[in-house]
Amino acid sequence: MRRPLKFVGLAATAAVLLAACGSSSTSSAGTSTSSNQPIKGGTAYFAEGPGASPNYIFPLTPSGNFSVNNLAQFQILMYRPLYYFGIGNKAAINYNLSIGNKPVFSNGDTTVTVTLKHYEWSNGTPVTARDVVFFMNLLKAEKANWGAYVPGAFPDNVVSTTAVNANTVVFKLNKAYSPTWFTYNELSQITPFPIAWDRTSLSQPAPSPTAANLPDTTASGVSAVYSFLNSQAKNLSTYASSPIWSVVDGPWKLSSFTTAGKAVFVPNSKYSGPDKPKLAQFVELPFTSASAEFNVLRAGNNAVTYGYIPTQDISQKPAVESLGYSIQPWIDLGFNFWPINYNNPTYGPVFRQLYFRQALEHLVDQPAWITHFLDGYAVPSYSPVPLAPSNPFANSTSKTNQYPYSIAAAKNLLTSHGWKIVNGIMTCESPGTSATECGSGVPKGRTLTFNMVYASGLTSLSQEMGAFASAAKQVGITVNLSAAPFNTVITDQPHCTSSQASCSWDMVNWGGGWEYSPDNYPTGGELFGSGPGHTGFGNYANTQANQLIAATHTAANAQAALNSYQNYMAKTLPVIYQPSAAYSISAISNKLHGVTQNPFLDLAPETWYFTK
């Protein structure tokens, strides 16, 4: 999930505010009287999200670890993707920062040829087409363990990947695809892997890049390689000392790492790409809560160089600015929601009823939550297509609240479908499948009492969930709330069937929804696509949604296909939409310059510097 966490978090008014705030995404000296002359050296301290420290280093990341804190703000510093996205605060591909040159599509858009720029691994070997093939071999064999995998999409749609020479790799596709979609959502997922990783134990020497018959070329061998690398990635205490993870092609390498999540990076002296680091060190600091981070920030002394103001403390913005910080909301291309478990053995049949999901959405007061809990630093989410930053994707349906807050509307939806309040609890009195009955699989006497687990450490999220539970109570629905650390919450909603013990969860809310990366075009296949052996978030599976998603991949009129998809998803509610806050209300030291707040949330401390 290349996202799920927002540090903080009115409709049109908020959208204008965010657009204005987001338009200046590079830190300046503010009121500093420095000469603005860059100096080499110094240490910048970046505050991690509350309870969301990096915990998985291997860039073939499973869904339980597929998050901003791992991919965008940890792995990418060390392991560069084939294609880099974000030009300043613009949501577009950045060929200047990409290892690959612009791809060439041929044979009716069924063949893709990519040539590589000159990059080197820190062990002195070049980044080659064979490294791309290595990634593809692992991904093909272990696609079920890839957080962005959707059956039928990448890598299933790639028939073959061939290194025709050291600098050229050719992809043969199973049919014609839109070049824009395939580049933004498929090639975007590739991270070349060094051949030094192509082994099955630490006792084996790192293989030569030109070695033949390596393990990744056989079915048994490639699975053994993945098993080894995955096991190494789970051993957090060895991240900085590992002979595996020390082979990097990005601008940074780990100097030290604690299991609590403190990561100390130093420049990779072998880095051959643009924007070579000027800092001597870059440090990511873990915090258990937003309040803990803010206490350190407002203490001054630059113990945090790049932190954030929790929403509940935004009134202290002037005080923070007086300490020498510039306040810049960080706007990302994403939307916010919480999943419900369609396969829950008790409540799955209830969740599958559209009228019931509509009733739940009527209990989410997005304008009020934005005003009172998020202090205006948010925009609504009405579909999976984001409203901010400004983009050409969202249509009028996605900009309109299909189910505005209404206790009366929510109650009417339930009572008109066979439910009645009995002893204070909404109860199914008329089971069956007619238009006035509870729906397929919902038995007589079923009561509406659910458990909701949400991420701890965010006051605004706690307030939102309290408001939701209070509204639900007014229509006879009991929502039992509990909080847990972010990393726990995102693993509490596994893909499962109703026969599995792990399928007992009802609703979870990690507080940050989804940010579109490494699938950067907002078609939602990795979110809502389904098929044999795989379902979307909350075990969502819908044939019509699958067809609409597939059409966005190949349609000649890309926007028309995207419109059909977003219209359906806005109205049928595969998840419950909630306000999308600014990723963070960033507080950046006026002494730190060159900071760009990437719309896909990638950190780039290699561009940062201090001044005299």
Image (cartoon, rainbow, N blue to C red):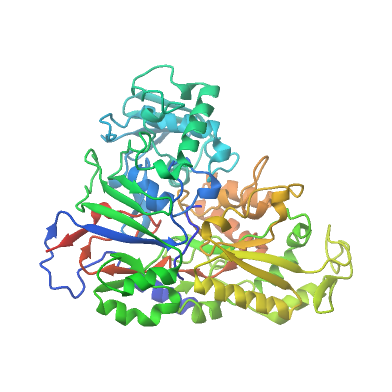
Left of 241 or right of it: where is 481?
A: right
In front here: 358 or 447? 447
Q: Position of residue 152 (x, y in %)?
A: 59, 39
Q: Quadrant of residue 298?
A: bottom left
Q: Is residue 174 visible?
A: no
Residue 264: x %, y % from top left: 31, 51
| Looking at the image, residue 514 lies above or below residue 97 | below
- Residue ranking furthest to the top: 212
What residue is rendered at 61% in x and 48% in y?
529
User: What residue is shown at x 37% (from left), y 37% (from top)?
Assistant: 242
Note whether 27 is above or below 198 in the view shown: below
Count how many numbered circles sit on residues in the image.
0
Q: Quick one: 369 or 265, which is closer to the camera? A: 265
Q: Position of residue 198 (x, y in %)?
A: 42, 27
Q: Is residue 352 left or right of residue 214?
A: right
Tell me the residue at 68%/40% (across/down). 532
Q: Quadrant of the C terminus?
A: bottom left
| Residue 526 vs residue 184, the one in the foreground | 526
* 440 up-or-down from 242: above or below: below
Q: Position of residue 466 (x, y in %)?
A: 61, 76
* Residue 274 in view: yes
